Image: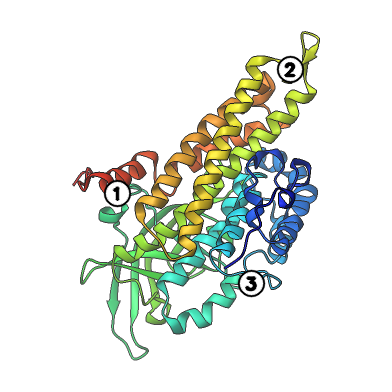
């Protein structure tokens, strides 16, 4: 357990904080010196290498591939020089997502596709032997994968509606599975080595999971065009036509959707951190703008109504950080409840929507241009608001826990 000093002299000044004024109550104080150093390297990379490219690539709807390997080389997933244990390590992981998201939502989504979604699928779904083989490769990105759950006709109703099928055929090598169906909105699929595909077994009707070679016969990927949110992130429509997968590539601990739900329970907190980071990025861009912009012969930041909006944004960010830090602490101690992660995702996303709207508002007409920086956050927030559980689905998960009654349609 990490001992946290709370004396006034130990709390960093606003100018010294890694996350600047957006971290008003200094949640950064929960991090160790080593963790701040690792995140400082990330901040330097994002400021000097990533930020200059973001507006151009957002407008082009392309991912800046030249950033991928340098970002991997930062060794952020399990830094060798960090020795802290849970729950403190989990808070580091959260701030890593926060830092990525306050720079760009697509970068955060791209990184967590591997470090959060795919890693969780292997950690929760793979057998002990499979984990020994795969997890080191997941951590160093030598085995890149994506989480392929959502389907063209099934998103919020995926638990009961999942229609991709898996049929088992016995053979001398232990058996082969044949997959048929489609997946949609799968981020990072075009550059992954394997697709973690969830399919319903024909024989027992239960959901299973498979690591499918992206280049396997019968697998086809199509880039989803025309997006107005997360334009840098490359999302794919995947078609599976008689795709053969050996039994050895099935995640052996996934036997029903309950096992998938356990993954979602852990991953939803990552999205809450992304929603919090987006707020910080939009707020910081808006604050910088109003300090420089002059109207009616005065600094825009000197107007009462502008200051009120800035205060509301900061309140949203501070509340969001409090939610995600406490949730992460609980999960670090092994407390995983659907309603807890649902509450964090629902509320941080709701506050995110208001925060990015206020940021765009105080920047005025320039707020719809990429040059002022808030436009990316304003548009990208809409995707984050919906993925990993919509507002309504998360609200119903919380309502079920509160009342003991399920309001989900049947």
Q: Is 120 rendered above or below residue 110?
A: below
The residue lying at 54 percent from left, 38 percent from top is: 381
**Front position in the image: 168 or 404:** 404
Q: Quadrant of residue 191?
A: bottom right
| Tag shown at residue 157 | 1
Q: Is residue 145 left or right of residue 338?
A: right
Give the distance between the C-alpha atoms of the residues marked 1 and 3, in whole angstroms: 34 Å
Image depth: mark 1 or mark 2 in front: 2
Q: Is 30 rendered above or below residue 140?
A: above
Q: Secondary structure at mark 2?
A: helix
Q: Which residue is mark 3?
A: 140
**Front position in the image: 61 or 304:** 304
The residue lying at 27 percent from left, 45 percent from top is: 402
Q: Is 36 rendered above or below residue 248?
A: above
Where does residue 18 sit, x and y in percent of width and height?
A: 73, 49
Q: How many marks?
A: 3
Q: Which badge, 3 or 2, comes first in the chain's sequence?
A: 3
The residue lying at 71 percent from left, 29 percent from top is: 287
Give the distance between the C-alpha atoms of the residues marked 1 and 2, in whole angstroms: 48 Å
Camera sees residue 186: no
Q: Is 363 rendered above or below residue 244?
A: above
Crowding at label 1, few (<14), some or many (≥20) Cα neighbours within 10 Å? some
Q: Which residue is mark 2?
A: 302
Give the distance between the C-alpha atoms of the residues marked 3 and 2, in whole angstroms: 48 Å
The image's colour scheme reads rainbow
Q: Secondary structure at mark 1?
A: loop
């Amino acid at each position: 357990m990490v001992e946290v000093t709370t004396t006034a002299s130990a709390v960093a000044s606003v100018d010294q904080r890694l996350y600047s004024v957006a971290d008003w109550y200094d949640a950064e104080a929960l991090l160790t010196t080593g963790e701040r150093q690792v995140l400082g390297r990330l901040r330097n990379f994002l400021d000097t290498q990533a930020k200059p490219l973001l507006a151009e690539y957002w407008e082009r709807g392309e991912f800046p591939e030249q950033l991928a390997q340098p970002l991997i080389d930062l060794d952020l997933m399990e830094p060798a020089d960090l020795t802290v244990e849970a729950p403190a390590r989990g808070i580091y992981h959260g701030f890593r997502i926060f830092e990525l998201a306050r720079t760009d939502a697509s970068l955060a989504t791209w990184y967590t596709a591997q470090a959060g979604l795919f890693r969780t699928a292997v950690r929760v779904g793979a057998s002990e032997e499979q984990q020994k083989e795969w997890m080191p490769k997941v951590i160093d990105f030598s085995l890149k994968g994506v989480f392929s759950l959502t389907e063209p006709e099934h998103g919020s109703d995926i638990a009961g509606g999942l229609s991709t099928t898996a049929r088992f055929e016995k053979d001398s090598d232990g058996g082969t599975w044949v997959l048929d169906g489609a997946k949609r909105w799968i981020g990072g699929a075009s550059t992954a080595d394997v697709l973690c595909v969830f399919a319903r077994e024909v024989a027992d009707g239960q959901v299973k999971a498979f690591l499918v070679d992206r280049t396997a016969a019968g697998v086809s990927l199509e880039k989803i065009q025309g997006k107005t949110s997360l334009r840098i992130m490359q999302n794919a429509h995947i078609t599976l036509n008689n795709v053969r997968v050996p039994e050895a590539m099935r995640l052996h601990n996934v036997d029903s959707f309950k096992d998938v739900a356990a993954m979602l329970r852990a991953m939803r907190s990552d999205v809450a951190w992304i929603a919090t980071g987006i707020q910080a990025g939009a707020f910081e861009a808006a604050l910088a703008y109003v300090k420089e912009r002059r109207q009616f012969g005065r600094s825009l930041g000197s107007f009462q109504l502008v200051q009120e909006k800035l205060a509301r944004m900061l309140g949203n960010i501070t509340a969001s950080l409090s939610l995600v830090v406490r949730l992460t602490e609980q999960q670090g101690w092994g407390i995983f409840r659907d309603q807890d992660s649902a509450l964090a995702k629902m509320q941080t996303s709701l506050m995110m929507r208001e925060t990015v709207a206020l940021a765009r508002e105080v920047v005025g007409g320039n707020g719809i241009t990429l040059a002022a920086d808030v436009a990316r956050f304003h548009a990208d927030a809409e995707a984050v608001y919906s993925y990993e559980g919509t507002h309504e689905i998360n609200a119903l998960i919380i309502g079920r826990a509160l009342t003991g009654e399920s309001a989900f349609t049947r």
